Image (spheres, coloured by chain):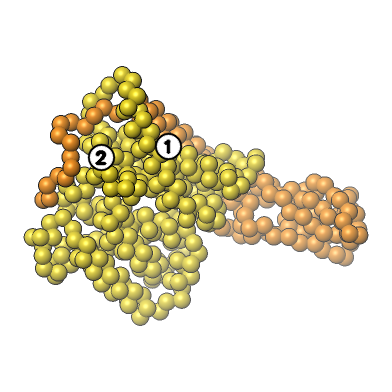
Amino acid sequence: MIVSLAFDARRERRYARDLARAFGGALLFSLPLLMTMEMWWFGFILEPFRLAVFLLAALPLLLGLAFYAGFSARHRGLGHALLDTLVALAVGFLTAAAVLSLFGVFQPGAPPRQLVGQLTLQAVAGAMGALLAGRQLSAGEDEVGDEAQATWPGELFLMVAGALFLALNMAPTEEMILIAYRMTAGHVAALLVVSLLLMHAVVYGVGFAGQEEQGRPLTAFFHYTLPGYGLVLLTSLYVLWVFGRTDGHGLPETVDAMVVLGFPGALGAAAARLLV
Amino acid sequence: MAPRKNKAPGPPPAPALLEWAAGGLGGLIVLAALAVIVVEARGPRDPAEVSARLDSVRPAGGRWLAEVEVRNSGDETAAAVEVEGRLGAATATATLDYVPAHGRERVTLVFDADPRGRAEIAVAGWSEP
């Protein structure tokens, strides 16, 4: 990455536009979470340990997204990806702070830990939105990101990012656990099969890089869908753990909830290719 | 592997100054958030300790509205906090969804007589979130 501290008005203006787009993306993608009351509560309910893990685990994920998607076509390479990650987090935190104050969520006199918790949870989703903004909101004027270059591990990484994004939007609500409670073992098995089939339909239908060689549906199933779904289930388990939904649950209940949250996760993973 | 599309030749251009500023701000915010979280994680984790005290009283429609301040001095959040006020044989109750660690909430209890100096205001119980 070239470093130049000279002031170039054209360059600054162009970047200001990228930045505005990033704020748009953060707002668009994190609004469902910003308007979910459980997310406000989790800001002070979650143990600091889980919150720290959540923030630290988000950093490499955002870096990967910045590498594959990023703000603008002019940003390539790891140096730009690092800078984009930090900018995306700034955008996520500022968007969350602005919207939550506008909604009157912040209580006057609340301890700093509470504000930090509420902002951190929202900022990660906002930062993901900011990084996807270049692709989603750029009106096709320029090709953003390097995802055409994604290798097989890269494709799986994008699946995890897609799964995390959708799972994060669903997991805070009580319904995830409630649905798992209502389901019998038969329901869970059926949902698992449906998740796999739907995921494969999207993966195979949309087409991943290298599908030309992997043209047969069965090969693609074992190459992308099956390992992808495994990662989706692990992502679901992680998100459930972050929100304390695994506490006090036995193994069967935890697996049920994992499959329930894995349903949106699988769709997110399969559609990651469309989003990123 | 698919070929690169619409890529400008040569290395990517230098980041704008605004980009350095925004990136620096992001780094600072993340470090500050981590600092607050880690300091709290390393400190003691006392269980929730919720107390209630009468703040102000005003008459309304022949009854008395008592504003009660509920405080949690512990390091863990209390959920479904039940606040009770007893005045003679009558009991007024109110429930709070959450009282965050080191947080403050307000509830209003309704009495038939002026509760000042005579009502017993207490927290009946709570659950873990």
Q: Which chain is mark 1 on?
A: A
| Amino acid type of the residue that numbered disc 2 sits on in the rendered structure | Ala
Lateral position of residue A210 relative to residue A192, left or right: left
Q: Within the image, what quadrant is residue B18 found in?
A: top left
For label 1, the crowd category at 10 Å Cα-Cα, with few meaning under 14, some 14 to 19 and many 20 or more, is: many
Lateral position of residue A202 relative to residue B107, left or right: left
- What residue is at 41 percent from the left and 39 percent from the top? A20
Q: Secondary structure at mark 2?
A: loop
Looking at the colours in the rendered structure, which chain would you say is drawn in orange? Answer: B
Question: In the rendered view, would you say A93 is above or below B47?
Answer: above
Question: In the rendered view, would you say A50 is above or below B127?
Answer: above
Q: Position of residue A165 (x, y in %)?
A: 37, 54
Looking at the colours in the rendered structure, which chain would you say is drawn in yellow? Answer: A
| Amino acid type of the residue that numbered disc 1 sits on in the rendered structure | Ala
Lateral position of residue B77 relative to residue A50, left or right: right
Report which residue position mark 1 lands on.
A90
Report which residue position mark 2 lands on.
A73
Q: Position of residue A274 (x, y in %)?
A: 27, 56
